[in-house]
Structures are given as C-alpha cells and as structure tokens.
Amino acid sequence: MDLESLFSVKDKVVLVTGGAKGIGRMISEAFVRNGARVYIASRDGKACDAAAAELNALPGKPSSGQAIAIPANLASLDDCKRLAEELKKRESKLHVLVNNSGATWGEEYEKYPDSAWTKLLTLNLHRVFTLTQLLTPLLEAAAVRSADGVIVDPARLIHIGSIDGIRVPKLPTFAYSSSKAGLHHLSRHLAVELGPRGITSNTLACGPFPSKMMAHTLKTFGEEIRAANPLGRIGLPSDVGGACLFLASKAGGFVNGATIRVDGGVSLQSKI
C-alpha cells in the first residue's frame, strides 16, 4: 500500500468534457502530469487543440501522459453520440469519465428567461446522463474484478457540481443552482445503478475557482469572496486536480455516491 501505487492513475484512459478551459483544463493537466491518456472534449475546437498541444509539451510529464483533442458540443445529442462512437473506435476501455462541461446564467428574477432553463438543464444535467449512458459499455470494460468476481478497481464517474447546488447562492442563478442540485442527485442515483456493474459515481461540489465562468464574479466580488472563505482564498488547480486523482486512483476505489465539497469550507458559513 505504498503511496505511489495507491494514488496512481498511470496508463488510465480518461475523458474530460469541457477539458480545454477553466476547471476542466486543471483536471486534464492533473491526469496528464500523472501518466494518464486524456481525451479533451468541448465545443471550442481551437481551444481543444491548443490545450492538447500545451499538455503534451509539459516538461517532466511521464511518457504515458498524453492529451488528445476530440471537439464536441456536449449540449447536442448528436455530438454526444459522435463523441462516444469516436472514443469506441480508439479505445476498448474508459477508466474515468469526468463530466465537467457546464454553463451558468445570471438574471434578476423578474427577467429570468425560459431559454436559460432549457440551455442549462440540457448541458449541466441531461447530457451528463446521455453521455454516461452512451459510454457505459467502455466504463464496464475498464472495471477490474478478482477471480471470484469481486470489484477491486471500478471505473469512475466524476461529476463537477457546485456548492450552489447545496446552498442557496446570493446571485440570481436559478437554473444553474437547480441543475447542479439535480446533478448531485443524479450522481447518487447512478452510484446505485452502476455500482454493481463496476462503476462508481461521485460529485465534486466546487467553490470559486479561476475560470471564464467565474471571471466576472471574481472581478466584481473577488475580495469579498476571498474574505468570506475560512481559508482566505479561492481554489487552486491542485485542489480540484488532486480531488480527481484521489477519486480515480485505488485510494478512492471504495468511495461511491459521495458529494465532496471542494470549497475551503465557505459553504459552511452561516448568513445569519
């Protein structure tokens, strides 16, 4: 039970949706630096290609650490099907699926548009189920069982949720917080459904991290956000990357159906 093997993801095959930017990029780098073969999928093809090139050029990474771009609009049913088929052509197993692609929408209550609900519930929740369903055969194939059939190293689903799916946010992001709360429960449902098939399902409820999605909020309220956190800062790439490595390695092999807050404790703060 040495540390190197306990937390190893070397030679694992990983798909990170939205893996070219923000939190997804942080997660992709963590896996590549630790020897995994990482497929990066997001709508922005140029960003996918650029991220893959940057990750493949990382100094000191293991030779097994590799990034491969497969652009796809994760809100599209057809693109999810195309992505799954492309991955099946390239790989016989998928050890880790990181469902990270997402969007937000802030608008005051009286003006909150119907289209925001359609967009966010589709991308943040519905297509997570779609893509997971399509890739389940590859995930099942990656599960390792003992000679007597016991699951000793399951495949992993890691869903990137939000503390706004646990608490009520101050900002008027009604569809976003609702979609993330739904994602957290979908993860638990999948844990029960897919656990017997050799696949665990867990969620990281992330707090503020530097990303395009958070850029305006951090620019406007950054100092307040940092001051409100018990640790006095926002998230670092190592925070979310490390949490994913834990869940994807032997160390996290018996964790199933959990929602782990990666937020420095800010969601525990009382507003009263």
Image (cartoon, rainbow, N blue to C red):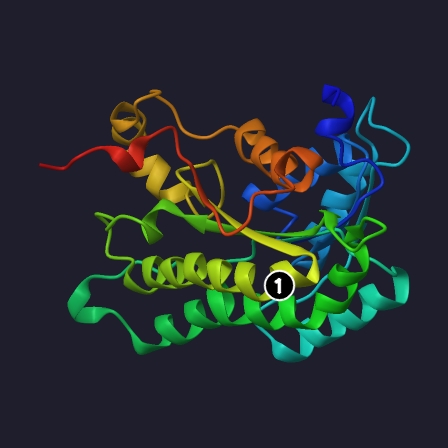
Q: Picture coordinates of residue 242 (x, y %)?
A: 60, 31
Residue occupying the point 82% across, 23% down: 59
Amino acid beneath label 1 = Leu
Is residue 99 among what the camera can see? Answer: no
Q: Position of residue 102 (x, y in %)?
A: 50, 58
Q: Which of 145 and 118 is in front in this view?
A: 145
Image quadrant where residue 133 sits? bottom right
The residue that appears at 74% across and 51% down in the rendered structure is 150
Across and down, in percent, residue 38 comes to 77, 47
Please indicate, yes or no, whether residue 32 appears anywhere in the rendered image.
yes
As displayed, is residue 48 above or below residue 192?
A: above
Secondary structure beneath dot 1 equals: helix
Residue 99 as seen in the image, left or right of residue 137? left
Query: What is the quadrant of the N terminus in the image?
Result: top right
Which quadrant of the view contains residue 87? bottom right
Q: Residue furthest toward the front?
A: 148
Within 10 Å of disc 1 (Cα), the crowding (few <14, some 14-19, many 20+) is: some
Residue nearest the viewer, comparing 160 with 193: 193
Q: List the residue tagged with mark 1.
A: 194
Nearest to the observer: residue 38 or residue 182 = 182
Q: Which residue appears at 56% of the width and 31% of the height?
A: 237
For the C terminus, which image quadrant? Answer: top left
Residue at 29% in and 26% down: 223
Q: In this view, does 196 lie above or below 211?
A: below
